[in-house]
Amino acid sequence: MEGTWTKLALRIWVALILLFLFIPILLIFFYAFNTSNIESWPIPGLTLKWFSATWDDPEIRSALALSLQAGLAATALALVLGSCAAFAIHRMTFFGRDAVSLLFILPLALPGIITGISLNAFFSFGGFPLSFWTIVVGHTTFCIVVVYNNVLARLRRTQGSLIEAAMDLGANGFQTFRDITLPLISTSVVAGAMLAFALSFDEVIVTTFTAGAQNTLPIWIFGAIRLGQRLPEVNVVVSFVILVTIVPVVIAARLTGGGGAARVPAAR
């Protein structure tokens, strides 16, 4: 009997936590369809006019384009640098390897405002004007972490005997990587890229310190909320950002849930 009541209590507790987390998000979606520009409950009616008004706003379209470009560029750089770092840490043994691995993970653990202020100080000290590329560099610093973690975790679960067998059969380094290693880590690479893009797309603190006069979607949202005069458009943009962020995370979770060994091509 105690076990039954314990399970019931835990399920109720989990349900309450989920409601606490997701009810505010659901309200944002409802307010995006609100006929009134005043956020009150219950909403007086449903309409799609705010979606067309938001899309017709050139400032929002410009911010969206900049966010997408910065996110894709940061993801591409993080994919290359994070994967290479994971291979180096996994394949090589050297003094201070654990410390280097900690340094790779540290940007994700640090508060965003610390990273943003540090990057801003570095760019000012080096005489680099804030631009699109400073945003990309800032986003890459924390996007590398998720790619690095995903690839390193998959490499640690990879069977070394497969690689050794391929090399024993005469495969060179490139062939071994193409036919064995890459299929084994492919899902972790894609998942890392998805998570990196999701992190980059909705990042506001680091972007604020590295964007200068440029306007990304998170910065536009922050400014519009402070003014409080464009709340319906803010709700539409926030709903879009939530969807763009959730979809890659869900796909990444599905990809990392599967094994990579089944993706190794069959022996010819």
Image: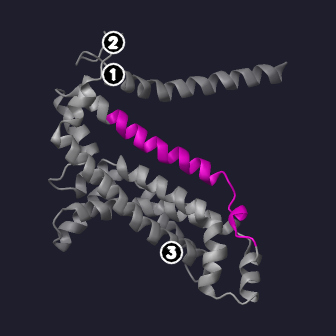
Could you say where residue 107 lies in the image, as x and y percent from the top left?
42, 60
Please tell me whether residue 243 belongs to the stretch shown in magenta.
yes
Provide the residue span drawn in magenta.
238-266
Query: Where is mark 1, residue-wise?
Result: 31
Please tell me whether mark 1 sits on a helix, a strand or a loop. helix
Is 226 placed above or below 220 here? above
Query: Where is mark 2, residue-wise?
Result: 43
In which quarter of the view is residue 77 placed?
bottom left
Disc number for residue 84: 3
Is 185 placed above or below 267 here? above
Magenta stretch, main secondary structure, is helix
In this view, the mark in front (2 or 3) = 2
Please state which amino acid type lies under the numbered disc 1.
Tyr
Please state which amino acid type lies under the numbered disc 2.
Ile
Pointer 3: residues within 10 angstroms few (<14), some, or many (20+)?
Answer: some
Badges 2 and 1: C-beta atoms under 8 Å apart?
yes
Pointer 2: residues within 10 angstroms few (<14), some, or many (20+)?
Answer: some
Left or right position of 189 against 112: right
Calculate the distance from the C-alpha at mark 2 to the C-alpha at mark 3.
51 Å
Could you say where residue 140 lies in the image, as x and y percent from the top left?
37, 63
Disc nearer the start of the sequence (2/1): 1
